[in-house]
Image (cartoon, rainbow, N blue to C red):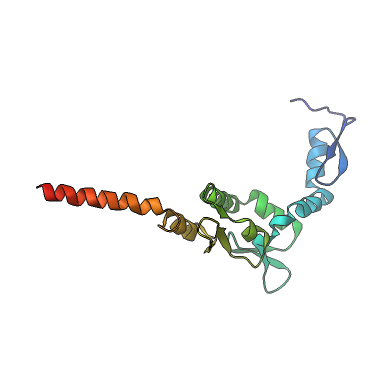
Protein backbone atom coordinates (compact mmCIF):
# COMPACT_ATOMS: atom_id res chain seq x y z
CA UNK A 1 0.00 0.00 0.00
CA UNK A 2 1.40 3.38 -1.00
CA UNK A 3 0.67 6.17 1.45
CA UNK A 4 0.64 9.75 0.21
CA UNK A 5 3.87 11.62 0.85
CA UNK A 6 2.55 15.12 1.42
CA UNK A 7 0.07 14.49 4.26
CA UNK A 8 -2.64 16.60 2.63
CA UNK A 9 -5.17 13.84 3.18
CA UNK A 10 -6.14 13.27 6.81
CA UNK A 11 -7.51 10.35 8.76
CA UNK A 12 -9.39 10.31 12.05
CA UNK A 13 -7.77 8.66 15.08
CA UNK A 14 -10.52 6.91 17.00
CA UNK A 15 -8.32 6.59 20.11
CA UNK A 16 -7.69 10.27 20.78
CA UNK A 17 -10.36 11.77 18.52
CA UNK A 18 -8.00 13.85 16.38
CA UNK A 19 -7.11 14.20 12.71
CA UNK A 20 -3.75 12.97 11.50
CA UNK A 21 -1.95 13.42 8.18
CA UNK A 22 -2.22 10.24 6.13
CA UNK A 23 1.49 9.49 5.76
CA UNK A 24 3.57 6.90 7.52
CA UNK A 25 5.70 9.51 9.28
CA UNK A 26 2.63 11.48 10.45
CA UNK A 27 0.96 8.33 11.78
CA UNK A 28 4.15 7.17 13.55
CA UNK A 29 4.68 10.61 15.05
CA UNK A 30 1.07 10.72 16.19
CA UNK A 31 1.01 7.24 17.79
CA UNK A 32 4.28 7.97 19.60
CA UNK A 33 2.97 11.29 20.92
CA UNK A 34 1.89 11.93 24.48
CA UNK A 35 -1.72 12.82 23.65
CA UNK A 36 -2.31 9.56 21.77
CA UNK A 37 -0.54 7.39 24.34
CA UNK A 38 -2.52 8.93 27.21
CA UNK A 39 -5.78 8.43 25.32
CA UNK A 40 -4.75 4.84 24.64
CA UNK A 41 -4.08 4.30 28.35
CA UNK A 42 -7.59 5.54 29.13
CA UNK A 43 -9.04 3.32 26.40
CA UNK A 44 -7.45 0.22 27.93
CA UNK A 45 -8.29 1.28 31.48
CA UNK A 46 -10.87 -1.50 31.84
CA UNK A 47 -7.90 -3.87 32.08
CA UNK A 48 -6.05 -1.80 34.67
CA UNK A 49 -6.81 -4.41 37.32
CA UNK A 50 -3.63 -6.26 36.39
CA UNK A 51 -1.56 -3.50 37.98
CA UNK A 52 -1.43 -3.06 41.73
CA UNK A 53 0.38 -0.28 43.57
CA UNK A 54 3.67 -1.09 45.21
CA UNK A 55 4.66 0.52 48.52
CA UNK A 56 4.88 3.89 46.74
CA UNK A 57 2.82 5.40 43.94
CA UNK A 58 5.91 5.41 41.71
CA UNK A 59 5.80 1.68 40.95
CA UNK A 60 3.11 -0.76 39.92
CA UNK A 61 3.03 -4.52 40.31
CA UNK A 62 1.92 -6.57 37.29
CA UNK A 63 0.05 -9.49 38.84
CA UNK A 64 0.28 -11.46 35.58
CA UNK A 65 4.09 -11.28 35.35
CA UNK A 66 4.86 -10.93 39.06
CA UNK A 67 7.17 -7.95 38.47
CA UNK A 68 7.20 -4.25 39.26
CA UNK A 69 7.19 -1.53 36.61
CA UNK A 70 7.38 2.25 36.72
CA UNK A 71 4.01 3.94 37.25
CA UNK A 72 3.90 6.06 34.11
CA UNK A 73 1.97 5.76 30.86
CA UNK A 74 5.01 4.94 28.73
CA UNK A 75 6.22 2.14 31.02
CA UNK A 76 2.75 0.63 31.34
CA UNK A 77 2.10 0.69 27.59
CA UNK A 78 5.60 -0.59 26.85
CA UNK A 79 5.06 -3.49 29.26
CA UNK A 80 1.61 -4.36 27.89
CA UNK A 81 2.46 -3.86 24.21
CA UNK A 82 6.09 -4.95 23.94
CA UNK A 83 7.05 -7.25 26.80
CA UNK A 84 7.18 -10.71 25.21
CA UNK A 85 6.73 -12.52 28.55
CA UNK A 86 3.66 -10.44 29.44
CA UNK A 87 2.09 -11.01 26.03
CA UNK A 88 2.82 -14.75 26.15
CA UNK A 89 1.40 -15.14 29.68
CA UNK A 90 -1.79 -13.28 28.73
CA UNK A 91 -2.23 -15.41 25.62
CA UNK A 92 -1.61 -18.60 27.59
CA UNK A 93 -4.24 -17.64 30.19
CA UNK A 94 -6.76 -16.69 27.50
CA UNK A 95 -6.16 -19.89 25.51
CA UNK A 96 -6.39 -22.02 28.63
CA UNK A 97 -9.82 -20.74 29.68
CA UNK A 98 -11.25 -20.57 26.16
CA UNK A 99 -14.27 -22.91 25.83
CA UNK A 100 -14.00 -23.90 29.52
CA UNK A 101 -16.70 -21.62 31.00
CA UNK A 102 -14.03 -19.86 33.06
CA UNK A 103 -14.07 -16.08 33.31
CA UNK A 104 -10.90 -14.05 33.87
CA UNK A 105 -12.56 -10.68 33.22
CA UNK A 106 -12.80 -9.70 36.89
CA UNK A 107 -9.18 -10.76 37.42
CA UNK A 108 -8.14 -8.43 34.58
CA UNK A 109 -10.33 -5.51 35.60
CA UNK A 110 -10.34 -5.57 39.42
CA UNK A 111 -7.12 -4.93 41.32
CA UNK A 112 -8.24 -6.90 44.37
CA UNK A 113 -9.27 -10.01 42.46
CA UNK A 114 -6.67 -12.77 42.20
CA UNK A 115 -8.86 -15.59 40.93
CA UNK A 116 -10.81 -16.66 37.89
CA UNK A 117 -14.39 -17.87 38.21
CA UNK A 118 -15.46 -21.23 36.83
CA UNK A 119 -19.11 -20.94 35.90
CA UNK A 120 -19.44 -24.68 35.27
CA UNK A 121 -18.36 -25.59 38.82
CA UNK A 122 -19.32 -22.29 40.48
CA UNK A 123 -15.92 -21.95 42.15
CA UNK A 124 -13.11 -19.42 42.18
CA UNK A 125 -9.71 -20.69 41.08
CA UNK A 126 -6.41 -18.85 41.63
CA UNK A 127 -5.71 -17.22 38.27
CA UNK A 128 -2.44 -18.74 37.19
CA UNK A 129 -1.65 -21.36 34.58
CA UNK A 130 -0.83 -24.13 37.06
CA UNK A 131 -4.03 -23.86 39.14
CA UNK A 132 -6.27 -23.35 36.12
CA UNK A 133 -4.82 -26.44 34.39
CA UNK A 134 -5.28 -28.48 37.57
CA UNK A 135 -8.91 -27.36 37.81
CA UNK A 136 -9.71 -27.94 34.13
CA UNK A 137 -8.19 -31.43 34.21
CA UNK A 138 -9.89 -32.29 37.51
CA UNK A 139 -12.90 -34.57 37.85
CA UNK A 140 -15.15 -31.83 39.20
CA UNK A 141 -14.71 -29.67 36.09
CA UNK A 142 -14.53 -32.56 33.62
CA UNK A 143 -16.34 -35.59 35.07
CA UNK A 144 -15.74 -37.53 31.84
CA UNK A 145 -11.99 -37.57 32.49
CA UNK A 146 -12.42 -39.96 35.44
CA UNK A 147 -14.71 -42.26 33.41
CA UNK A 148 -12.07 -42.78 30.73
CA UNK A 149 -9.41 -43.50 33.36
CA UNK A 150 -11.73 -45.98 35.08
CA UNK A 151 -12.53 -47.74 31.79
CA UNK A 152 -8.81 -48.03 31.03
CA UNK A 153 -8.23 -49.49 34.50
CA UNK A 154 -11.17 -51.88 34.10
CA UNK A 155 -9.99 -53.10 30.70
CA UNK A 156 -6.46 -53.60 32.08
CA UNK A 157 -7.80 -55.68 34.98
CA UNK A 158 -10.10 -57.61 32.60
CA UNK A 159 -7.15 -58.50 30.39
CA UNK A 160 -5.16 -59.62 33.44
CA UNK A 161 -7.97 -61.98 34.40
CA UNK A 162 -7.90 -63.61 30.97
CA UNK A 163 -4.40 -65.03 31.49
Return the x and y of residue 76 as percentages of the image width and height: 70, 57
Q: In the picture shown, does residue 120 fall above or below 2?
A: below
Return the x and y of residue 2 as percentages of the image width and height: 77, 25
> How many numbered marks are there?
0
Q: In the picture shown, does residue 57 fall above or below 90?
A: below
Q: Nearer the viewer, residue 163 or 129?
A: 163
Q: Nearer the viewer, residue 137 or 29?
A: 137
The residue positioned farthest toward the top in the image shown: 2
Q: Residue at x 75, y 60 (%)?
A: 72
The residue positioned farthest toward the bottom in the image shown: 55
Q: Identify the image quadrant of the N terminus.
A: top right
Return the x and y of residue 16 as percentages of the image width and height: 83, 47
Return the x and y of residue 113 as percentages of the image width and height: 62, 65
Task: Using the rendered view, name the quadrant where residue 143 is placed.
Answer: bottom left
Q: Residue at x 52, y 55 (%)?
A: 120
Q: Nearer the viewer, residue 55 or 160?
A: 160
Q: Residue at x 66, y 54 (%)?
A: 79
Q: Residue at x 18, y 52 (%)?
A: 157
The residue positioned farthest toward the right in the image shown: 8
- In the image, taking residue 108 as reference, residue 39 lies left or right, namely right
Amino acid sequence: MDLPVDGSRQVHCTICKSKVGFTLSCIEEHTDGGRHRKALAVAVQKYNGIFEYEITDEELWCKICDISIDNDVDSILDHVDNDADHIAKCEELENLVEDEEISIEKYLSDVGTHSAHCKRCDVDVPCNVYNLKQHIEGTRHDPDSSDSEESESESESDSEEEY
